[in-house]
Amino acid sequence: MTKRLLIGAAVFIWTFIKLPQEYWIHIAHLDTTDLIKEELFGVPADTPFSEIIADNVRFFIGLLVLLGTAAAGINLPIKDKLPAAGWKLAFDADARGRDVTDEQIELQAASMRGHVFTIELLEKIALLSLEMIIFTRIIPGTASKPSEQAIGIAVFIILNTVVSEFVTR
C-alpha cells in the first residue's frame, strides 16, 4: 500500500471514527447502547439485547446482509492493490512453521548487541508515556503529574531494556 493511502486511511479513521467516539464518550458522557435501545428500538435501556434481537430478527438479518455486502464492496476495489497473502488463514500459529532461519535470528541479535539507547527506545518511552498519561486521566483520584508518570515509565523501560540486553549477552 502506498504511503498516501495509509495516511489517508489514518486521517479518515481519526476524523470520522475516533474523534466522534471520544467526544461521545468523554465529553457528552453518552452511552451508545442506551441510545440504540431507546431511540432505534424504542425499548427501555435495561432491556437485554437478546430480547431486542428476538423481537427484530428481520432487522438483524438485514443488517448482517448489509454489513457483508459493504465488506465485499470495500474489498473489491482494494483487492488488487493489497500484497499477496504470506500464508493461508490458520488458527494454529505453529502450523505455518517459522519464517526465519536460526542464522537470520542470530545475525539480527548480533547486529543489535551493544545498541541499548536507540531511537526505538525513545519512541517506546514516548508512546507508553502518552498512553499511561491518557489512561490515568480517565481514572478518578490519580495524584501523580504527567511529568512524574513519564519519568517513571522511562526508568522502567530503560531498566527493562538493560536487563534484556544483559540476558541476551
Image (cartoon, helix red, strand yellow):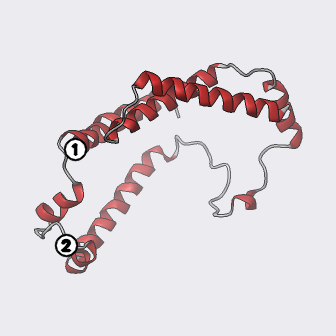
Three-letter code for the amino acid on which mark 1 is drawn: Trp
Disc 1, SS: helix
Residue 132 placement (x, y as % from top left) = 45, 34
The disc at residue 24 is 1
Q: In percent of the image, x 39 and y 37: which residue is there?
A: 136
Please state which of residues 72 and 13 is positioned toward the viewer in this rendering: 13
Q: In percent of the image, x 54 and y 29: which residue is there?
A: 153
Please state which of residues 164 and 106 is positioned toward the viewer in this rendering: 164
The disc at residue 47 is 2
Disc 2, SS: loop
Does residue 162 appear in this view? yes
Earlier sequence position, callout 1 versus callout 2: 1
Three-letter code for the amino acid on which mark 2 is drawn: Thr
Q: Residues within 10 Å of mark 2 (few under 14, many from 20)?
A: few
From the viewer's perspective, tell me whether residue 94 is left or right of residue 152: right
Residue 90 placement (x, y as % from top left) = 64, 62
Tell me: residue 92, above or below residue 82. below
The quarter of the displayed image where residue 7 is located:
top left
The quarter of the displayed image where residue 43 is located:
bottom left
Tell me: residue 16, above or below residue 112. below
The disc at residue 122 is none
